[in-house]
Amino acid sequence: MGEVAELVGVTVFALSGGLVAARRGMDLFGAVVLALAAGLGGGTLRDVLLGAVPPTNLSNAWALGCAVAAGAVAFYWDLGLARFRRAVLVLDAGGLGLFTVNGAVTALALGAPPLAAVLLGLVTGIGGGVVRDLLSGQVPVVLQDDIYALPSLAGSVAVVALWQTGAWSAPAGVGVAAAVFLVRLLARRRRWHLRRTAALPPAWPEHPQPPRPPDTDPPPASS
């Protein structure tokens, strides 16, 4: 279950990375790089924080192959702007749910305490999207869009609670991942977001360049 969920999550996030690369005007190499970053970013962060070096995904030929193939497919997947936005939203929400559950379970299986497992589930869930957005020159979704990290955090808490009470099972994990997925989509559709501050003026106002002095050279003498 864990390996399958990992590969599905890698593929889903990698597809979102390839789509973003194509929309940002990158070439095929850029699409593959962005797909690898999105697909493997969250799991790599998780493994590094857990001390599992080298990270599992970087030594897993299946994970690398799925990410590269997904990036190439997404690059040639011709979508209009509206369909592109919907596809990235759905793929991103799917990857969020899968990696949240997988990250928390992996941390618990390696003996991490409950609080650390919750945080690692969150980091694994949002990590790939953050790396993808930064490499594509965008503000990460988690920092400025509708509710994104909260479903992941709630999913991590649910996984840890199920694990600690002995109620954890593969179907329960699927249910938690589906719940994270659905809450993320619903938050986007209903425009749920945390309170935002008003945009502030720059700390140092920009001073315009002083006007160019008029030409003071004497006029040419008339003959």
Image (spheres, rainbow, N blue to C red):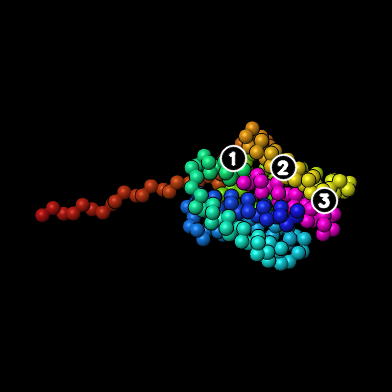
Q: Is residue 213 left or right of residue 130?
A: left
Magenta part of the protein: which range?
91-114
Residue at the disc numbered 2: 178
Compared to 2, does 55 lie above or below?
Answer: below
Amino acid type of the residue tagged 3 in the rendering? Leu
Q: Residue at x 50, y 42 (%)?
A: 81
**Mark 3 residue element:** helix
Residue 28, horizontal then vertical, whole percent: 50, 58
* Position in image of residue 38 (x %, y %): 62, 54
Q: CA distance from mark 1 to mark 2?
A: 38 Å
Q: Which residue is mark 3?
A: 115
Q: Earlier in the sequence, mark 3 or mark 2?
A: 3
**118 on left or right of 80:** right
- Magenta stretch holds residue 79: no
Q: Is residue 143 visible?
A: no
Measured Cα–Cα span from mark 3 to mark 1: 35 Å
Estimate how packed mark 3 is, as few (under 14), some (14 to 19) or many (20 or more) residues with alpha carbons within 10 Å.
some
For label 1, the crowd category at 10 Å Cα-Cα, with few meaning under 14, some 14 to 19 and many 20 or more, is few
Q: Residue at x 89, y 46 (%)?
A: 165
Amino acid residing under circle 2: Ala
In-front residue for pair 141/88? 88
What is the secondary structure assignment of the residue under circle 2?
A: helix
Identified at 61% across, 61% down, the residue is 65
Going by the numbered disc 1, the residue's amino acid type is Leu
Residue at screen point 26% across, 54% down: 217
